Amino acid sequence: MFYQTESKAQGWRAVAVFGDERGEALIVIGRSSTQVRASYVESFMEILDEEEREQVNSIALQRWQGAPDAGRWLHQTNLKVPTSARLVRAAA
């Protein structure tokens, strides 16, 4: 029996790339690049602690290419790493 849990696959994601041995951390996943771009700053603050945020070199915006069970993530562009000044303004 097949259960479909969503009408459309989540085809975009933002991934934090660390400058040390940690590698990468998933920040947010969504159905469109617009959706991911709109929510990655808030997710960045919620998911990573202060020490981890300081170690992030870049945030990669990636798109899924291929079938849901056989594909790969393709790098599309880099997103701006949130800074404390931007985060203070966003919270106000």
Image (cartoon, rainbow, N blue to C red):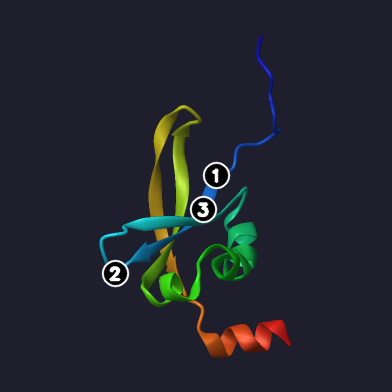
> Is the C-beta separation of discs 1 and 3 under 8 Å?
no
Q: Which residue is mark 1?
A: 11
Q: Amino acid at mark 3?
A: Arg
- Dividing the image into 4 quarters, which one contains the N terminus? top right
Could you tell me residue 27's position as x and y percent?
52, 58
Closer to the camera in the image, 66 or 90: 90
Q: Amino acid at mark 1?
A: Gly
Closer to the camera in the image, 83 or 12: 83
Residue at the farthest top position: 1
Could you tell me residue 68's position as x and y percent?
51, 30
Q: What residue is shown at x 60% (from left), y 66% (from top)?
A: 46
- Dividing the image into 4 quarters, which one contains the C terminus? bottom right
Q: Which residue is mark 3?
A: 13
Relative to 12, say whether 45 is above or below: below
Q: Amino acid at mark 2?
A: Gly
Q: Nearer the viewer, mark 2 or mark 3?
A: 2
Element on which disc 1 rests: loop
Could you tell me residue 4's position as x and y percent?
68, 24
Element on which disc 3 rests: strand
Q: Which residue is mark 2?
A: 19
Tell me the CA gap for discs 1 and 3.
7 Å
Tell me the CA gap for discs 2 and 1.
26 Å
Question: Is 37 left, or right, of 83 in this rendering?
Answer: right
Badge 2: how crowded within 10 Å, few (<14), some, or many (20+)?
few
Relative to 75, say whether 39 is above or below: below
> Is the C-beta separation of discs 2 and 1 under 8 Å?
no
- The image quarter containing residue 87 is bottom right
Could you tell me residue 43's position as x and y percent?
59, 64
